[in-house]
Amino acid sequence: MIVAEAVGRALAACGVDAVFGVVGSGNFHVTNALVAAGVRFVAARHEGGAATMADAYARMSGRVGVVSVHQGPGLTNALTGLTEAAKSRTPLILLAGEATEARSNFHIDQPTLAAAVGAVPLRVATPEEAVPRAVEAYRTAVEERRAVLLNLPLDVQADSCPGPLPEPPATAPESVAGRQAGGPGAGGALSDYEVGELAWWLAEADRPVFIAGRGARHARRELEDLAERAGALLATSAVAKGLFRGSPWDLDVSGGFATPLAAELIRGADLVVAWGCSLNMWTTRHVTLISPKARVVKVDLDATAFTAHARADLGVTGDVAAVAESVAGQLTPRRGYRSDDIAARIRAEGRWRDVPYEDESGGGRIDPRTLTIGLDDLLPRERVVAVDSGNFMGYPSMFLDVPDEGGFCFTQAFQSVGLGLATAIGAAVAQPDRLPVAALGDGGALMGLAELETVVRLGLPMVVVVYDDEAYGAEVHHFGPHGHPLDTVRFPPADLAAIARGHGFDAVTVTEPSHLAGVAGWLDGPRDRPLMVHAKVTGERGSWWLEEAFKGH
């Protein structure tokens, strides 16, 4: 077989089960080889969408995400999605044709381009390397949780490939879900000293709080068991939202999205333990959520997390679940931060929809809080919510509840606008038993417009909600108060519902709460077409989370 076929079949043998992409001449054969080996191919309309779909698929399925693109412009089109995956340590392989002839109009320095955004560049330089490099790409993605660019030079792709296909690697694809970012200590023995210190600090703490991040999404049981013994309250970073859903001690998300109650209780902690969470400026509100008097512990496989972002008084190197289980075995149960009064306050004030607000709906626009609470009441609980970036993003992130950590997909490590719809598609492919909900601003919706056709073509029963303030709202609220002109960030009305219908969607325009009856009607029907909810939202003031974000600019 030729090299391109060998690479595709080797990746399938490793356990790859889905590939997203846009096919051109440079990736035609490798894509067909994957399909011939039983891998599902999902065609996107833009390579940027394909990369983000694969990223979201990996996050929600626990398997390696794979993207297939053409050489040169296919890769540059995918670059933003690749950057997001690299920053998020998503296990992902991007297969790209490569024009190595400098006079080719497709020629660029693809390895340097990938390295510049944090991905790992590999190349199949000879036919003999085809299978070993494919396996290396897979192992690197899984074992180190890295985004990998596997370059496939055009002249090498067509050569005959010697040798048999490999056996699948010892690292099973299912293990991706339970891995944090690789680093020192991965898979090694825990330090008795570090575990003992954490147990001692928990035994001394009166008000401990656990904040779980991406590296803890596999460890709910172990963390809840330890928190029960330590008397700790439970919170998450945004990417782990839903991890402790159902617990009476769940504060939901820490950071800019935190409710007033969550912010108060986290600030009141005398010990903060970050589990697979680096405690960046978003999770800590620029460290203002951590009392200067509080001790801070970080538990992570990657020891570099101990010196990143918020300070760590103690670093414990190891897998979150293993560390939590070991510490629990050394800890005598205590009441800690848990009391009847705290439990009652969490029940009464623990979600943003419980926080009183003045409804600003009117004049042909709906308050985004009212809109989102209405949608939360209507949409089925078994959902997966994907949120784009922008001024609006706090509303769907916090007012749309999710059933567990598999219900929220947040591709925001790079803070790029325009990834939300593709994120929802990848999440929907990974979890077909859930209702996919894409929450977008009007700017992000128009950036990702091409993938509306993909939603229809795949037959996804998706709800796409567009929070339309006819502006890049973050810039309006950032620069407007200082008297700057805003003509460059405001736009005339666009009939997004009509655009969606043109792609094959059902659509409803919402300017007041009664218009949500159209959503209820769609939910009661056959759901044989996706639904666009074009919501014209109020935009007189910035969202609460945006005020926090501006402190970092």
Image: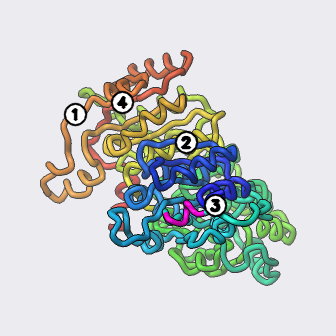
Name the one closer to the observer, 50 or 39: 39
Q: In terms of sequence position, does the residue under pointer 3 or pointer 4 come before the other?
A: 3
Can you see residue 242?
A: no
Q: In terms of sequence position, does the residue under pointer 4 or pointer 2 come before the other?
A: 2
Query: Left or right: 194 with respect to 369?
Result: right
Check disc 4 and give the amino acid type.
His
Residue 157 against residue 420 in the figure, above or below: below
Q: In terms of sequence position, does the residue under pointer 2 or pointer 3 come before the other?
A: 2
Q: CA distance from mark 3 to mark 1?
A: 41 Å
Q: Quadrant of residue 383?
A: top right
Single out the mark in the foreground, 3 or 4. Answer: 4
Give the residue at mark 4.
534
Q: Across the whole image, how many numbered discs are drawn on residues?
A: 4
Marking on residue 42: 2
What is the secondary structure assignment of the residue under circle 3?
strand
Marking on residue 469: none
Give the residue at mark 3.
212
Toward the front, the furthest residue is: 160
Name the one closer to the observer, 255 or 302: 302
Mark 1 is surrounded, within 10 Å at the Cα level, by few (under 14), some (14 to 19) or many (20 or more) other residues, namely: few
Check disc 2 and give the amino acid type.
Val
What is the secondary structure assignment of the residue under circle 1?
loop
- Part of the protein shown in magenta: 155-159
- The image position of residue 395, as x and y in percent, is 43, 43
Q: Main secondary structure of the magenta part?
A: helix
